[in-house]
Image: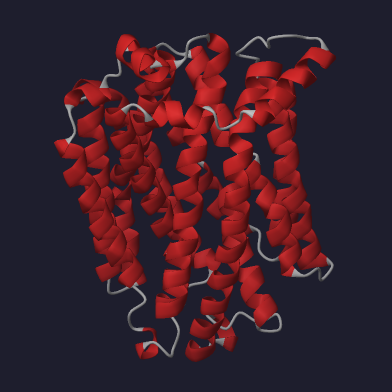
Amino acid sequence: MCGTLTGLVVLDAVMASINGGKDVCCGPAFDAIACKTSMSLATRATSVFQVVGGIASILTIPMIGRAADIYGRKPLFVLTFLCSEVPALALVGVTHFNFSVYVYFATSMLLQMVPALSLFLLWINDCTAPEDRIKISARFEAFKSMEGIFVPLMVKVINGELTVSLIAYLRLLEMMIALCCLKESFQPRSTRARHALSQTWKAVKDVWRDVPRLCSFKATRSIFLLGFFATGTGLATISILFPFCKARFGVSRQTFSLLLIIQTASNAVVQFCITPRLKRWGLRCIFATGLACGAANLLAFMLSPSFSVLLGLATVAGFGSMGGPAFQTLMMDFVDSAATSETERGALLATLLALQNLFVVLMPPLYQAIFSVFVSPSMYGGRLMALPMAFGVFCQFVCILVLLRLSPEVFYPSSSSANRSLTS
């Protein structure tokens, strides 16, 4: 729940630190030139720290997967939520005790280095049959979308510094829920601490040994690269949506929260009610439909003449999220077919997610850097700020064309073919 809340608060905190505590993009201190200049600086600073944390996470995610195979899933969940509390406390220090905003940026890299998504996918992989994964993945995405409904409501009701304190309390609540309510889905290899530590050290030494094996399967390599690129493009365009609306329409985070509520409610409805009923379409069709709808959303948002029109378009934006569960299901199916034993599933899935994270981490800062250039008043007065979204539309359509040319066998990885390719 805290991811959306933090995203809404941090941008305002950075903008305020640049402008002496004032929000120059809305309210009585509005200044169009200062707003665009500050937005350029803020997005540039954010992108730099995201790149640094992302590069570190590419090394740590496979280690987290191997540790989950050694110790079980639940201890790693607790570690993930414990790490998430550190940047939340740093954000409290920024707003309440005048800490530098760079303290938050430095500690937020922990969230990228120990991500919860890989552990949730492992948990789904452990607990579900292959034919149920698209449904469970879609419902998992639906529940994730619920934060986009409740959190913006809290932002509209609870303003100012209390919102930041709420983040810290919610992070603590997440950790307590994981500790007390989450059931272990995988029995660890050994309960002996010395043996577990030796296995962890061995995992650190050969953490990337699965990459050449995964890349040796040509057909799967193509679909994974496509999925990684499409996922990175989608997250990159989402990362500039709030700065885009703030710079173009002068909206505050309270006003933007209404857009988030509508859009994520649409996501939840699509993922909970529609995507699970499309299993007969096949993973390729669901994936392609999600890409096409995502491109249409970006095009509509880019051409929207006012924020009110954006609110109307957000009611159907959820169809652009259909591709996520399909690609997650494909990764889990491949891990099942490629793993030679149950104790390799965490390592293989984590390696795939680390490769995906290479795109997820690098592409949002790239788009933010491009946006920071085109929103600057020196670049035609900031009139070209929508160009990063236009580039995202182009990338999504390229992904659709490549997806439709892939062999159908890619979307149904068989155990024999995958194992042959990985052991050859």
- Residue at 68% in and 17% down: 70
**Going by the image, does 153 lie left or right of 337?**
right
Q: Position of residue 92 (x, y in %)?
A: 77, 59
Q: As displayed, is residue 153 above or below residue 402?
A: below
Q: As displayed, is residue 193 above or below residue 357?
A: above
Work out whether residue 166 can be spotted.
no
Work out whether residue 318 can be spotted.
yes
Instruction: Name the quarter where the C terminus is drawn.
Output: top left
Front one among 423 and 116 = 423
Q: Position of residue 200 (x, y in %)?
A: 72, 24
**Going by the image, does 63 lie left or right of 253?**
right
Q: Residue furthest front?
A: 424
Q: Quadrant of residue 388?
A: bottom left
Number of callouts? 0
Instruction: Name the quarter where the N terminus is drawn.
Output: top right
Front one among 42 and 313 = 42
